[in-house]
Image (spheres, rainbow, N blue to C red):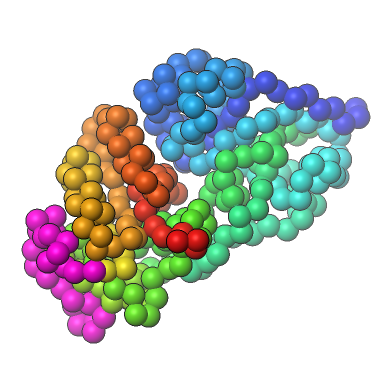
Amino acid sequence: MAINVEQLSGIAFLAFPEQTELLISELSSRFDFCEKPESFFGELIYFSNKDSFLEKSGGKYPYWARTVMLNPFILKFDSISEAANHLKSIIRNWAPYQFKCFRRASLIQEKLPYINLKDRKFPVKIPSSQIGLFTLIDEHTIIASAETTSFLPAGTLRFVEDHENPPSRAYLKIQESLTMASLLNGTELPTHGSKCFEAGACPGGWTWVLVELGAFVHAVDRAELAPELMKNPLVKFQAHDAFTLKPTEIGPVDWVFSDVICYPERLLKWIKEWLESGMTKNMICTIKMQGEIDWNLIKEFEEIPDSVIVHLNYNKHELTWIHTQTQKD
């Protein structure tokens, strides 16, 4: 059997792990795209009518898809070398999504130009380079797309975890969100001399990341942070409901952060107060979903100028809103 390539007319969405149902729900409730998937390849969902989706979505893509195959094709091949050589003839960078034929997929990846598929050590710079996605359907068949919606390999970013020092695993969310702010906007991370305000900081996972970067953190919560952070000279702790403090009571800061569990309506109002005050230009906030998602409300976050909403690899039933200065600012 010689190499055989079939261009597909559809589009394929790669869901975040164990979040396929949320992705399908988003497609129907956010975009009114209710067509039945033609195929499931693990967490990769293929729909045959791409034009219908693009018409309904207006060029936007679902948050619960870690990446999207924009121009998928089927590649039939005899040997591992044939598969790798054909992929290389299209673009340099390819990442695998593996749900079967794991060994064969790894052998194909080994014959492709190197990309980093390992867990990253924070802080890390992610190159904004085109990266394709391929998935083995069986030992001699691949579904692939050189055009995708993410600069991350298979839309995935994982960090080398510190199991000893952070007071909670929430630290991974701020590491990823800061990395995405850098990747999407070219924003510099907080550093020595940066002033940060964190709402709802207890037990201090986000504060821990910020002081590790050398930033000063005004941390506010009703409960204290972990003891080591309470003693850290870079941390000013204030026992209070952070959302009742006015920006003018805090003063100008370089960054504002919130991972508070609250209704999205309250978070949106708080965000607008900070932006209207002019006291900060950089904000990262977690939008915690309370039951069924109100997509009209999410759209209000989305429409705030100079902001972006992402679903992080370390998010679950939540989204992350990022508003930052870009390099050109």
Which portion, as a residue range, is magenta? Answer: 229-252
Q: Along the line of sight, which residue is nearer the eye, 257 or 231?
A: 257
Q: Is the N terminus in the top left, top right, bottom left or bottom right quadrant?
A: top right
| Residue 261 seen from this side | no
Q: Residue pushed farthest top? A: 35
User: Residue at left 39%, top 75%?
Assistant: 191
Asked if residue 241 is among those painted magenta in the image, a careful observer would answer yes
Report whether 29 appears left or right of 252: right
Residue 63 placement: quadrant: top left
Q: Can you give x and y, in whole percent of width and height, for residue 93 in the image?
A: 71, 50
- Counting labels gives 0
User: Residue at left 35%, top 39%?
Assistant: 303
Position of 15 relative to 31 (above/below): below
Q: Is the C terminus in the top left, top right, bottom left or bottom right quadrant?
A: bottom left
Q: Can you give x and y, in whole percent of width and height, for residue 197 in the image?
A: 24, 66
Position of 78 relative to 236 (above/below): above
Asked if residue 242 is among those painted magenta in the image, a careful observer would answer yes
Report whether 197 appears left or right of 78: left
Q: Along the line of sight, which residue is nearer the eye, 306 or 311?
A: 306
Position of 128 relative to 8 (above/below): below
User: Residue at left 33%, top 60%?
Assistant: 281
| Residue 12 seen from this side | yes
Q: Along the line of sight, which residue is nearer the eye, 39 or 329?
A: 329
Position of 188 relative to 137 (above/below): below
User: Residue at left 19%, top 52%?
Assistant: 273
Q: Can you give x and y, in whole percent of width and height, for residue 171 in the image?
A: 35, 63
Q: Can you give x and y, in whole percent of width and height, for residue 304 in the image?
A: 33, 44
